[in-house]
Image: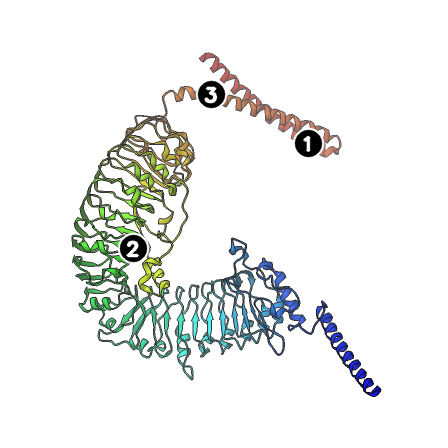
Amino acid sequence: MSISCGCKGSYDSSKHATLFLVILLFSTRACCDDHPHASKRISCLESERSALLAIKSDLYNSDHWLSSWSGYDCCNWSGVACDNTTSHVIRLDVHYPLDPYVSYPEKNLQGNHITGEILLSLGNFIHLKYLDLSHNRITGEIPLSMGNLTSLIHLDVSSNEFYGCIPDVLGNLINLEELVLSDNNISCQIPGNIGKLHNLRYFNASMNYLMGQIPMSLGDLCNLEDLDLSENNIGGELTNLLDGLSKCPQGSKLQSFVVSHNNFTGSISTGLGQLTQLQDLYVSSNSLQGNMTDAHFSQLTNLWGLDISYNSLNLILLDDWLPPFHAYKIDMSYCHLGTRFPSWIRTQTTLQELSLSGVGLYGNIPSWFSDFIFNNSQLHLDISSNFLNGQLPSSLSTYMDLSNNSFEGTIPLNYRNPEAVQILLLSNNQINGCLPAFFCNFNILMVLHLSNNYLSGEVPNCNGSYPISLNFLHMNNNNLSGPFPSALRNSDELVSLDLGGNKFFGEIPNWVGRSFPLLKFLRLSSNSFDHAIPASIGNLTSLQVLDLSFNNLIGSIPSSISNFSSMVVKQNYTDLLYARSDHQAICESYANQLYRCEAVVNSFKDNIIITAKGLTNEYTNALSAVASIDLSNNNISGEIPKEITKLHGLDFLNLSNNHLIGRIPENLGAMKELESLDLSMNYLMGEIPVELSALSFLGSLNLSHNNLSGRIPTGGQLSTFNDSIYVGNEGLCGVPLPECPGDEANHSPYQAEDDDKLERVLDYAIIVIGFIVGFWTYLGVIFIKKTARITLFRMVDDMYDWMYVHLSLTFTKLKLKWQEKSLST
């Protein structure tokens, strides 16, 4: 029994001892893990961790984006990845935004971009395979230390502020497959060492200031799939590059070739036709010349996008040519084609964009083209500025620009697919007849330009269906008549409305001020509108251009014009004039191609005609920043409302040839942006406000043929005008007109007295200066030796003689003047 008990106790003791050892082991492990210098769980190397922290300290505003860069396990830091075996950092991604799905407390995310210069320590990551620093504001030159990153496969430093040259040492990155340098300030020539990167598949250096020529060595990059050098200043020819790529032993892999917006010259080599993998060819906006034939496209069976526009290329393509490709986009604008409408377009059944503007096309549009458009209703079509004539096509597409041709006849009475069109430009043709009733069915039409044609009759009245999506409507310079078009009453998204140069009559309806809350440009000039300008026009708070000139308007200028808030402050330049912030509703027909719909919408730039400074100009690029009011050549009466002076952002103001009375508002000088002011041919009275001289931008002023009186203010821009701007105001005087009565009598005595005072002051000054010089010279002579003293005294004698003669003449002159003055009194 005792043995048995003893064995059991020994077993329990060993069990307890084992349990104790296990607990002790785990406790020790936990303590070690909690120790700040514990290293067993750290997966990154200390040297690389220190290098990362050095980079962070050199990058301004990095505390926010790189807030996770703390602690000892750098492999778990945001944007950092390590090799599972060696623990070396192989991936560094700190592009902006680091995480687009994370909400940050700062409202201005733009201020959170990384800024600063990259430290040389970046070159310590010799095992790095992926480096992305894009979309930040990193400045400085691309560091030479990047040449040490020989394991790098992907390098992206796009959308920063790097400057200087592309360093030659990038040619050391022999494993590099993707090199993205776009959207920086990099200059100089592309180094020839880039040609050593035989594994390079993607090279993008667009939107920089690169110059010089493309090195021949780039023609050796047979694995290159995507090359984008667009928007630089690179010159020279493309021949060596294209010929080099066409001679690759296994054939070039180039799929995208983009060199648009550069200074390339010479012709395009036929070696282009050997790039069998090519999908995108974009060489627009250069100075390329010479012929392009079917040989240039002979083996381009995969070509998807073709843009050779804005060059001096001469396209020699037979009418029966069968392209080996089926393109999505073809843009040959402002090259030379010089044929009838090409029938080879009929083969491009997948075409979504066709631009043949200014290529010299002539003749009629073939009948098959209407079917082609109908089957490609999302086609972006631009055949403007040619010599095409005959009837318009009977089908519509999303974007159609047929302007600046010689199309004639009437607008088709019933388009086959009016629901497809969003932008329709038919201006500057010879189209006649009435506007068809289906105008009311253009439910998603945003832009309609019919200006400079021979359209007549009234705009149709719409019942039940209205062109509710219109943003821009130009019907100017036709023969349209009738009252203000009521069909527009529901077009509450109008931004620009131009009905000028027609025969519209009647009153401007009150609902105009309520129906167009987004209207920026309203031009109704050269019609026969009458009655008074409605006070509700002041509700058009977004209005920047108001032109009601050359009508029969009566009444006074409504004081509500002070509500034009877009004229109160100077507007900034912008390319976006559209009212809609969300294009989803009008792009539903594109299904999953919303991005393309918005691209079509934003590709259009509106224009408006403005007469100012005696000139009539068409504003396009600067349209968003201009502000103008033109009420000239009407029968408007009453005084100029003082509220008009609140429009501090107004550039042009023309109220000429009316029946305005009263005074020119004194606060007109507060309109600091005013460049042109025309108040001529009215009945204005009183003096010209002195405040006009404070208008520093005023380049054109006309106050002629009024009843103004008094002295013309001087100074500022007023001193630059001649007398023609004041003609017909009998009461005006002063420069540049004859002097005001009494000016000479009031001016001469004071002027003579001032002259006398000046002469006396000068004489006294000479006497005092002479005394001081003589006194100190005398004292100095005491310490000079005899010969010098004799010379000095002789000089003093000569000076005395000169001063005596001068003072005698001066006193004699003064004496004569005093005698003349006493005799006159």
Residue 589, by quadrant, is bottom left
Looking at the image, residue 431 lies above or below residue 155: above
Check disc 1 and report the residue beneath it: 792
Quadrant location of the C terminus?
Answer: top left
Badge 3 crowding class, 10 Å Cα cut-off, few under 14, some 14 to 19, many 20 or more, is: few
What mark, if any, has residue 339 been given in the picture? none
Check disc 2 and report the residue beneath it: 446
Note whether residue 544 is visible.
yes
Q: Secondary structure at mark 2?
A: loop
Looking at the image, residue 671 lies above or below residue 74: above
Which of the two labelled residues, at mark 3 and mark 2, occupies the earlier sequence position?
Answer: 2
Quadrant location of the N terminus?
Answer: bottom right
Residue 444, by quadrant, is bottom left
Cα gap from disc 2 to disc 1, whole angstroms: 95 Å
Cα gap from disc 3 to disc 1, whole angstroms: 45 Å
Which of the two labelled residues, at mark 2 and mark 1, occupies the earlier sequence position?
Answer: 2
* Residue sitting nearer the eye, 518 or 756: 518
Whole-percent x, y for residue 9 in the image: 81, 82
User: Is 156 situated left or right of 655 in this image?
Assistant: right
Whole-percent x, y for residue 78 in the image: 58, 66
Three-letter residue code for mark 2: Met
Which mark is nearer the camera, 3 or 2? 2
Looking at the image, residue 754 lies above or below residue 148: above
Whole-percent x, y for residue 618 in the image: 30, 49
* Residue sitting nearer the eye, 112 or 771: 112
User: Is 691 situated left or right of 51 in this image?
Assistant: left
Check disc 3 and report the residue beneath it: 750
Badge 1 crowding class, 10 Å Cα cut-off, few under 14, some 14 to 19, many 20 or more, is: some
